[in-house]
Image (spheres, rainbow, N blue to C red):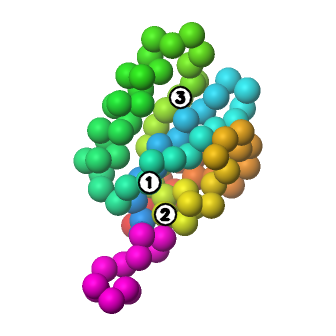
Amino acid sequence: MDDAGAEPQVHLWGYALRREWPDGTHDLFGFTPRADVALRRLDRDRSYWRTGPVRPTAVYLVPVHAADVTTHPVRDCRRPSCPDAPQRGQR
């Protein structure tokens, strides 16, 4: 706990967007502890890619620890240990 009595962001559980690409890589980004914010981000990301010439194969939310998103590579990740299932990490 920090001085204000709130958990530091790195110790939080919440949600992040996972974007899968045709080449087998993925992105993990947009951490938030709030489900409503995560759903808005998901809708916005899906609508952005909907009409583009290059599209992800999937975009979805995963429950995740903030530290997993903070330490995740910015792009071209192929690690099989990254959060990728809705059940993983839920409280």
Q: Is mark 3 on a helix, strand or loop?
A: strand
Camera-near label (1 vs 3) is 1
Determine which residue is flagged by label 1.
Answer: 31
Residue 45: x percent and y percent? 42, 30
Q: What residue type is labelled 1?
A: Phe
The N terminus sits in image quarter: bottom left
- Where does the image place residue 12, in percent across and percent down from the top left? 42, 69
Residue at image location 67% in from the left, 24% down from the top: 22
Q: Image quarter for residue 31?
A: bottom left
Q: Main secondary structure of the magenta part?
A: loop
Q: Residues within 10 Å of mark 3 (few under 14, many from 20)?
A: few
> How far apart, in angstroms, are the residues tagged by discs 1 and 3?
18 Å
Mark carried by residue 66: 2
Q: Mark 3 points at which residue?
A: 58
Query: Where residue 80 sits: x, y (%)?
Result: 71, 49
Magenta residues (range): 1-11
Q: Which amino acid does label 3 sit on?
A: Ala
